Image: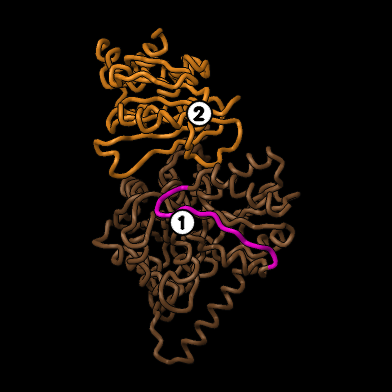
Amino acid sequence: MKVLMKGNEALAHAAVSAGCRHFFGYPITPQTEISAYMAKTMPKVGGTYLQAESEIAAINMVLGAAAAGVRAMTSSSSPGISLKAEGISYMAGSDLPALIVNVQRGGPGLGGIQPSQSDYWQATKATGHGDFQILVYAPSTVQEMMDMVGHAFDTAEKYRVPAMILADGMLGQMMEPVTLPEEKTAEASSKPWAACGHDNKREHNVINSLYLTPNKLEDLVLERYARYQKIQETEQMAEEYKMEDAEMMIVAYGASARVARGAIMQAREKGIKVGLVRPISLWPFPVDAVRSNGQKVKDILVVEMNMGQMVDDVRLAVECRTPVHFLGRTGGMIPSPIEVLKKIEELASKSK
Amino acid sequence: MKDLNVLFAGFGGQGILFAGKVAAYVGLLMNKEISWLPSYGPEMRGGTANCTVCISDEEIGAPNVPNPNVFVVMNLPSFDKFIADVESGGTVVIDSSLIDKKVERDDLNVFYVPASEIAEKNNISGLANIVLVGKLFHEMKFASMEMLDKAIEYCVPKSKEKMLDMNKQAARLGACFA
């Protein structure tokens, strides 16, 4: 039988199953259950759980553990992620794979503690200073909170880039039935670059992000961007729902995709042909799925729990050939399916 | 089956989230799609607590339901806050030992159960939440008592095993209350 689990617990459980034995964090609502689960579980499986003195300390511990070649992670919520920005940039600049979880809450500032998606820009455009990207995944169910973890670790290690799971307070706190993943105890991939002791059998491995010679630094960034290019070509993830005959496309991810799905079912009952493209990877943005579907429809509606942070990415994907509209709530408010339905009806009546 | 969107609401400490979890497990045992969404944050500390449980044959969209079709309520502030939101034709189960008010709408199925009093009398005070769950599933004719027992077994942690029979008794007391 499936078991009922909170999104946060499911994510933490999956991380342990994926072979992660190093968790460093600092408490914050609404991600607390991740830390609590790790505090309980890590000692039992021979791992390390450490509550650091701050978010900045925690992310730098993740950097250290990742440099030593082990699967390491941290989790936080919006204001805490801002504090981790420096460390994430250093990890990107040192080509270190690791997992960062953001269970988003309302912002800016300390904001609130209710669910939000207002860190989309931060996650996909500028998680810290410098020329870099990180992998960003947006689960939409508790099962996906679980399934994304192993995938995020694997992909991060494959390309040597940090990965983020961008969830929100709703997905973190809600319970749904899940099928537990298989245990993976061995480290997934060999890491010849890791600084983990060399027994005088090889040269020192150096993990570093400081390069004072500009052309050396430029070369490194260019090499990294070649990897980003490969990621954009091969790692896009999106789900399509009722798009076959759709005349209107909703683009929504995470919790707001669930709201959109509810609205689509009701709109379909009223004869409005509307479908959903749900980005699962936010970086790389699923340009292919959004473009191919978006150029077939009359209207595109972006639904988010922020002020419209994904709208430009959708416009760019469809090269502005289809009008892109927006419906969102912010500050910790969740749009209701009725609100989305009204917007769908309004757009459908205008385009007739 | 018609979707059940159940809102449980009351004070923190009354077992609102636990009652929701039992209801969710009943759905799970019946192979339905389910979701359980709690209120969280400062409001739980002595303030109002609530959770929403959706049980459906279809995949569940938004787990937050602005208009529930079942409302189980254990305090006056929650009653006042949510009673207008209940879908027309919906079911309301009220702990009438804690809420001294009648529902003024005439489009709802209302059950007044003095759950706290019943629990107190039977030496299981603190289990009014499960008395109400027992009444709810009995009236909705949604699940058998055996199913409810099984759900309770899943929800009561092993460290509190002595609570198991008391919870089962509470569910029966609720179901039998006419």
* Residue A13 in sight from this viewpoint: no
The image shows a total of numbered marks equal to 2
Amino acid type at circle 1 is Gln
Residue B132: percent from left, percent from top: 38, 19
Name the subunit of mark 1.
Answer: A
Amino acid type at circle 2 is Glu
Residue labelled with disc 1? A117
Residue A347: percent from left, percent from top: 65, 52
Q: Quadrant of the C terminus of chain B?
A: top left
**Is the stretch drawn in magenta largely helix, strand or loop?**
loop
Which marked residue is nearer to the observer: mark 1 or mark 2? 2
Q: Colour of chain A?
A: brown
Q: Colour of chain B?
A: orange
Residue B160: percent from left, percent from top: 30, 26
Q: Is residue B118 above or below residue A77?
A: above
Q: Does residue A45 appear to the left or right of A232 in the view shown?
A: left
Q: Depth check: A341 or A70 in front?
A: A341
Residue, x 40% and y 59% (percent of image)? Answer: A73
Residue, x 26% and y 62% (percent of image)? Answer: A54
Q: Which residues are magenta?
A: A321-334
Residue A74, image quadrant:
bottom left
* Residue A346 in sight from this viewpoint: yes
* Label 2 neighbour load within 10 Å: few <14, some 14-19, many 20+: some
Q: Secondary structure at mark 2?
A: loop
Q: Does residue B119 appear to the left or right of A157 in the view shown?
A: left
Name the subunit of mark 2.
Answer: B
* Label 1 neighbour load within 10 Å: few <14, some 14-19, many 20+: many
Q: Secondary structure at mark 1?
A: loop
Residue labelled with disc 2? B87
Residue A41: percent from left, percent from top: 35, 46
Per the model, the C-alpha gap separating discs 1 and 2 is 29 Å
The dot on residue B13 is none
